[in-house]
Amino acid sequence: MITHRSYAVEPWTVRETELSLDVLAQSESVFALSNGHVGWRGNLDEGEPHGLPGSYLNGVYEIHPLPYAEAGYGYPESGQTVIDVTNGKILRLLVDDEPFDLRYGRLVSHERTLDMRRGVMERTCEWVSPAGTTVRVRSTRLVSLAQRSIAAVAYEVEAVGSQARVVIQSELVANEQLPESKGDPRAAMALQAPLEPEEDFASGSRLRLVHRTRHSGLRVAVAADHVVTGPQRTTTGSESHPDLARLTVASVLEPGEKLRVEKTVAHGWSGARSLPAMSDQVDAALAAAAHGGWDGLVGQQREYLDDFWARADVEVDGDEEIQQAVRFALFHVLQAGARAEERAIPAKGLTGSGYDGHAFWDTEMFVLPVLTYTSPDAVAEALRWRQNTLPAARERAAQLGLRGAAFPWRTIEGEEGSAYWPAGTAAFHVNADIAHAVVRYVAATGDEDFERDTGMELLVETARLWRSLGHHDHRGTFHIDGVTGPDEYSAIADDNTYTNLMARANLLAAADVVERHPKEAERLGADDEESAAWRDAAEAMNIPYNGELGVHEQHAGFTRYQRWDFAGTRADQYPLLLHFPYFDLYRKQVIKQADLVLAMYTCGAEFDEEHIARNFAYYEPLTVRDSSLSACVQAVIAAQAGHLRLAYDYAAEAALMDLEDLEHNTRDGLHIASLAGTWMALVTGFGGMRRSGETLEFAPRLPEKFSRLAFSLQFRGRRLRVEITQQSATYTLLAGPSLRIRHHGERVTVNPDSPVSHPVPPPLHRPAPEQPPHRKPNAR
Ligand code: BGC
């Protein structure tokens, strides 16, 4: 765990001013660069020392058998796991016969900076070799947001004080050795040597390796080209082997002289394309990148990010750490989704191999909300990926005896990758989450083509699932039994409120869309009768409520369970899943992560303010936040219920999850949902932003510490800027025609060129609820 503040607090950068080898793996995640297609962990240029080497290509995975002690019908037979592909980052350095390895010699200084405006990671260090030669090394690395297959490094070494003989070996390395994973179920299984060599090539400054995964049959091609600048006496040579291609650059540097290698790396993969086609593809990508050279890549990156920040930046006055953290969060959310293009957005993005590189509902319920209002095109792409996986989801539904599509709980390629039913396929809510994301995207963009070509099919197939999964009882009430909601400490429960409310919205949205597009509905075989059945189910949906306590039940019967023995649970026994059997968690009132509380956020119109406060007070003392998906949601509802102080603490927890390694597993990759949750906590928590149909509503109230919060949103062809202080909120239309919104319930029209301000009402005063012992968020 990072126990001290590891990074300087600055608004646009994350800067590490000294190297701590004991937290190297965490910092590799924090400094990871990605564009959603290629991901490079922040490994040191020289390759070693490392925590976890990682180079990923979104969608490249290997299959492994899923062993069961007792097999059963419908259990997935194989799992998918992300693999470490050919590493193009490596530039090894030899100084006067000694390897530049920071574990030896003397490190005078070492600084790494993630620059979120320029989209680069910079490193400078000064090192004295064991034999006493001093060199300064500077490197700049980027994964291009503009050119999807490209990553690049500029590596420069300078002799300081005396002459130095230096050799730089720029490499492509396949099948790197990976450290063993240590039995944490959230880490990845490390597959050793998953790539079979197909081609290796080196000529002049050009290198290329092509491999194929053994079982999943995916071809991976990585090529590199170089521009070398140095003194005249510099020589170069290249060679290749099945798992290694290398350019060697040797020189003698007089004091003050520099040797610089600009390395551009192109990546490609395919399950269908031939070996020559893949080789050509990466060569062509290099040619495109060479066009503008290194400066061109750096310039494009800046342009791309200028555009992003103009749409997406969140400004916070009054808490510098949160300011930095929310930009860090937005930067990584963008990196995870920017160029994923019809591929999944995994729970860790491409920053590490945690959760085997799988995507979960995290995408639709945490990541896509941010992207919907900041980079909507990426949302359409992510949902098209779901559409592309419909054949697998339909097959899964059929296997389970259900209609429509049953999307996987966790996956890379679309097949169910969970071997554990209760916290896997039984979490059917993922289907309604996908539908919710479709509705949100269409409402926020008005993208009718998408609705017709992609959204509709997703809505219809998920509605069919709900209709066949649930049933009307003798009174006509509709139930969905035996499912797992978001809280994974309850499983296979009846009528999970979140699931039922989300399914209800799913059924109604499907019925609406079928009526709007009758021709396409016919193509999908959906008729009036079917949509009437969806409406019947939706209207008769059971929403469990305990009248005596005056609270909604997380699922039918939940409030009757015995309470978990919180007083008898020690601080070091969290997360509970690593210390107690699931059967005991399942039968007690103890909550891993916001569930009913999440329902109050995503289906807010179903709850009045009184119930929001009462439910929150009931569920808070039961919620242990053993998932990083919880704090941000609790922040939002705490803010709505008037507990601004508590909301602030939760928002900070979500925001600092990775910068402070709060869950002790940042080494495996960043918690992308929690990062996205930072935006959620600020914009929908303190900004009180909700969408009701095609209207944006705001109910802003800032915590005491904030003097100002400002953010921009893309909405139906507009760009709206919202600026909130303790006293008032100002709405400004930066682009697009007039927009009608609501401010604390009041109708407001925002016209171009005329910002409108409205007062922020005084805070609500309610006693803040308690959390379980040891589970209070850190007070800020
Ligand atoms: C949470 C899930 C989440 C998964 C991946 C689990 O710990 O309980 O809700 O989808 O992590 O982030």
Image (cartoon, helix red, strand yellow):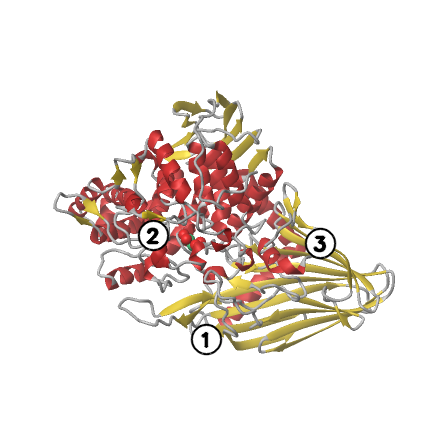
Alpha-carbon span between mark 3 and mark 1? 41 Å
Q: What x and y, as percent, mark residue 540? A: 19, 41
Query: Which comes before the other along the chain, label 3 or label 1?
Result: 3
Nearest-to-viewer mark from 3 and 2: 2
Local crowd size for mark 1, using a 10 Å CA cut-off: few (<14), some (14–19), many (≥20): some
The residue type indicated by label 3 comes to Glu
The residue type indicated by label 2 comes to Ser
User: Which residue is tagged 3?
Assistant: 18
Q: What x and y, as percent, mark residue 747? A: 39, 23
The residue lying toward the viewer, choosing from 150 and 90, is: 90
At x 59%, y 42%, the residue is 306
Q: Is residue 317 above or below residue 393?
A: above
Q: Is residue 57 visible?
A: yes
Local crowd size for mark 3, using a 10 Å CA cut-off: few (<14), some (14–19), many (≥20): some
Query: Which comes before the other along the chain, label 3 or label 2?
Result: 3
User: If the picture is divided into quarters, which one holds ligand 1?
Assistant: bottom left
SS for tag 3? loop
The image quadrant where one finds the C terminus is: top right
Q: Residue furthest front?
A: 568
Viewed as shown, does residue 700 lie left or right of 169?
left
User: Which residue is tagged 2?
Assistant: 490
